[in-house]
Structure formats: structure tokens, C-alpha cells
Image (spheres, rainbow, N blue to C red):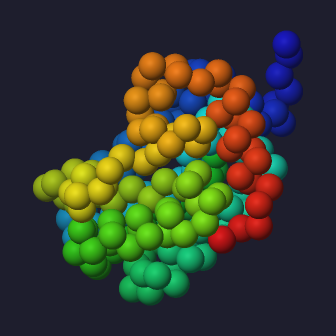
Amino acid sequence: MARSSMSSVKSASELLAARDARQELLERALAAGRPALLFISLNLPGPDKSPPGARLLFRCTFERIAESFPGSLLLSRERDALGHYALRALDVEPLAAKRLCVGIEESHPAARLVDLDIYAPRRGQVGRAALGLPPRRCLLCGQPAVDCMRSKRHPPASVIAQAHELLTRPAP
């Protein structure tokens, strides 16, 4: 199957290069010593990282984050092979920031596709476990998503279809 340069479906090498570039950006920002960083992205299964509805979901989330963290500083807002992303510096205690982000991630069915990752300079990523919360749930069965991914419990097409269905719902 030929891919045009306008295709939103990316090769594995393009996805890996984008992941590496994001990690480098994050590491540079962490070295600057801010109390907390917020990495905003979408968690979309499958090779198409910009299906219909993704841009609107990202924009609505981006705006909600700006309202929720009024003193934050936008460090980067881009689109790469993995889709849209942004990095904000926060002057908020990392656990408080993560608590607020979890509330946003759980505020709307489509927000389940949003990743709001908090990082602290000496602590690294601040996960849900730091708040005593369970891992995120699978889009299809409600079990821990990481378990379903590792065991390949569901056909990829089913997970992708569910994610795309969530993107058709009105934005949060």
C-alpha cells in the first residue's frame, strides 16, 4: 500500500523518531529546574495518530489546561508523527498538578484518550499510583489497559474502532 506524504498514517521509524524527539524536549525542560512539567498528548491506538476528531479533542484539552493552570508557561506546542502535543511548565506542586490532571482525564468519555503526564525534576514522571489511584482502564473491557496491551487481549481493530467512536462525541 503506497502512502502519500499527506497521509496521517506513519511508519514505525517515523513514530520512533518522534518519540525520541519528544523525550529530548522533555529532558531539556526538566534540566531547567521547573517545579513541574505537564506533557499534553493524545493516546490514540493504531497507526493513524490524527483521525477525525483528534485535533478538536486536543484543542479543547489544551484550552482547559490553560484555564486550569493559569500561571503555566507554554514551552512547546507541535504536531509530529505521533500527533499533537504540548509541553507546559507549571509552578504547582507535582502531586497537586497530577490530581487535577486525573480529574480532567476522567471528565468526559473522549478525555479517556488524553494523556496528561506530570514530570518533576528529581522524581521523574508522577503517575496515578502516587495518588493511590488504579491504572487507567481498557477502552473495551474495563481491565487495566496495560494488561490488555501486553497480553494483546483484544483485536487492534476493535480498540481503534472504540477510540474513533469516542472521538465522535462532543468535545469536553
Residue 10 appears in the picture as rendered: no
Seen at 71% across and 52% down, the residue is: 166
> In the rendered image, which quarter contains the C terminus?
bottom right
Residue furthest top in the image: 1
* Residue 148 in the image, given as x and y percentages of width and height: 47, 28
* Residue 120 in the image, given as x and y percentages of width and height: 23, 60
Q: Is residue 68 above or below residue 113?
A: below
Q: Is residue 135 above or below residue 63?
A: above
> In the rendered image, which quarter contains the N terminus?
top right
* Residue 70 in the image, given as x and y percentages of width and height: 44, 86
Residue 109 appears in the picture as rendered: yes
Seen at 45% across and 38% down, the residue is: 143
Would residue 104 be found to the left or right of residue 90 on screen? right
In-front residue for pair 14/120: 120
Q: Is residue 21 above or below residue 84?
A: above
* Residue 125 in the image, given as x and y percentages of width and height: 27, 51
In-front residue for pair 120/77: 120
Seen at 83% across and 22% down, the residue is: 3
Q: Is residue 28 above or below residue 149?
A: below
Would residue 127 be found to the left or right of residue 122 on screen? right
Quarter of the image for residue 123 reads: bottom left
Residue furthest left in the image: 122
In-front residue for pair 160/141: 141
Seen at 25% across and 68% down, the residue is: 94
